[in-house]
Amino acid sequence: MTKINFYGGVDEIGGNKVQLISPENSIFFDFGKSFNREGEFFSEFLQPRKLNGIMDLVEFGLLPPIKGIYREDYLKKAGLHHTPQPSSQGIFISHAHLDHMGYLHHIREDIPFYMTQDSHRIIRALEMTGIAGFNNYTTYQPDFLLLPKKRASKNSTTTHKRATSRDDIKKPRQIEIMEPYQEYELGDLKISSAPVDHSLPGSCAFMSDDGEEAVLYTGDFRFHGRREDQTRKMIKEAKKFTPTTIITEGTRMDRDHNLTESDIKLKAAEKARAHGGGLVIVNYPLRDLDRFYTFYQVAKESDRTMVVNTKQAFLLNEFGGEGYPGLKDVAVYIPRRGWGLLGGKSQVCMENEWISSCELEQEYLDSDYKGWEKDYINWDNNVNYLNLQESPGDYIFQCDYFEFKELIDIKPENAIYIKSKTEPFNDEMEIDARREKNWLEHFNIQIETGYHASGHACRPEIMDMILEINPEKVYPIHTRNKENFKPLEGEGIKVIDPVLKN
Ligand SMILES: [Zn+2]
Ligand SMILES: [Zn+2]
């Protein structure tokens, strides 16, 4: 008998970890981090420890204690048993948001991940440009290794040292890039992906059939972005697939309409045009390339250049101009790092003499930058704080809250700040929003709100989708409004309350 276990995403937005057990197989739809539940126990300065493997997260029920799915190094380090064979045949990632894939790091290397090409690009960018931590998403780097120490003397016995530089033992994980609507067979399970519209590229639903139960897992989806046709096609194909069960998201089951991506474009273009001569600052979710594209178009329409940060530049480079403007179409903002020599306004001491940083050779300036970011610092279309200071009316400047330090260098006069992000929905975000307001007030920057379109469909759209596909039963997840699904019972569709397992 097919069994469905929910290890997250129940009565909460995100943290999806849905296990599907068929007579022969076990797979997961998503393996996400629950921000709310993790936030109940951990914070920026109170983080789970690597030294305890998975156990700091298991302690609070953030990772489920399932045998045969976790990485060998973390189990053994915590004194736990590692089974020779994995107990799951694959993890199917619906999209690259952390609440759907944020705990992949902890999964053993012989369990393959299935995802779309665009999800892979985004997840790789997340891994490469993020702060190091639990982020072995597309690669696997074993921890707690002792390596033989090289000894000068021939007669000495071998000793070992801790592996510190582990790049040589880093290997790619087993990742299967899924083509849309192509069927993948895992024993008795047949699974295909169905692309959908959501607030980042590469999002998809999954259809799985084990001969007994045909399941549609929607992931996160909407109709009001740039890819409405994909969601419509998913529904059409799902109808033909005649699922017995739909596991659907219900984030916005308390809302009856949405602001669309094109609403934002119209409104923002008008605002940017009316603000001629002044800097337009915009803050939108980094990985939402559709929102990036909206503001790229706004820049074009208001005769400005779109300026992105280096992380966004890395992501655009991953896409290589496919479906989105490429690196050549935007300017990249280079912040001051290290000693902050960029811009030539500081002095450094060389052999007892203080000299201006603009007299230094390029290699000194370059040494302010490290790792992946180094590849972007000498790009042709680069700008820095001086450019934004000199001709503010020429640019739309992408600036995240975490990059507000740049405002101290730019010292903008007559700037506006378009906040194109979701409103705060927890205490931590409220505190950040207050700080954001303080910074903007300090620099006399006008804040413009009402420029965000949600990544999720609203109640009538979700209800119509379910009625159209007409399954036997529905599990509402990724929602705090599961009771709003109840009217489906009147249409002969059973609404099952998912039970959180830990
Ligand atoms: Zn989500
Ligand atoms: Zn999402």
Image: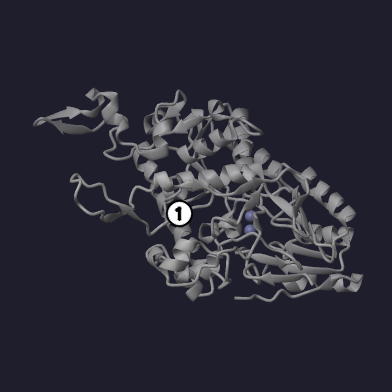
The reply to whether residue 451 is in sight is no
Q: Residue furthest front?
A: 155
In the image, what residue occupies the spot 41% across and 67% down?
A: 77
Please provide percent x and percent y for residue 300. Answer: 60, 28
Report the residue that reaches farthest toward the left. 352
Amino acid marked by disc 1: Lys
* Pointer 1 residue Cβ closer than 8 Å to ligand 2: no
Q: Residues within 10 Å of mark 1 (few under 14, many from 20)?
A: some
Question: For residue 61, which quarter of the picture?
Answer: bottom right
356 relative to 46, above or below? above
Identify the residue shown where x is 69% and y is 56%. Answer: 220
Residue 22 image-quadrant placement: bottom right
Compared to 68, does 100 lie above or below? above
Query: Which sits in the foreground, 288 or 417?
Result: 288
The location of residue 110, given as percent across then percent down, is 57, 56
Find ligand 1 in the image and state its quadrant.
bottom right
399 lies left or right of 244: left
Image location (x, y in percent) of residue 199: 65, 49
The way the protein has been coloured in the rendering is: one colour
Q: Look at mark 1 in the image and give the residue it sits on.
A: 437
- Looking at the rendered structure, the number of numbered marks drawn on it comes to 1
The residue depicted at 41 percent of the width and 28 percent of the height is 387
338 to the left or right of 390:
left
Could you tell me which quadrant the C terminus lies in?
bottom right
Name the spot of residue 263 as percent of width and height, x first. Answer: 70, 43
Q: Is residue 481 above or below residue 385?
A: below
Q: Nearer the viewer, residue 426 or 462?
A: 462
Visible residue check, residue 460: yes
Could you say which is closer to the camera, residue 140 or residue 418?
140
Q: Name the element at disc 1.
A: helix
Q: Quadrant of the N terminus?
A: bottom right
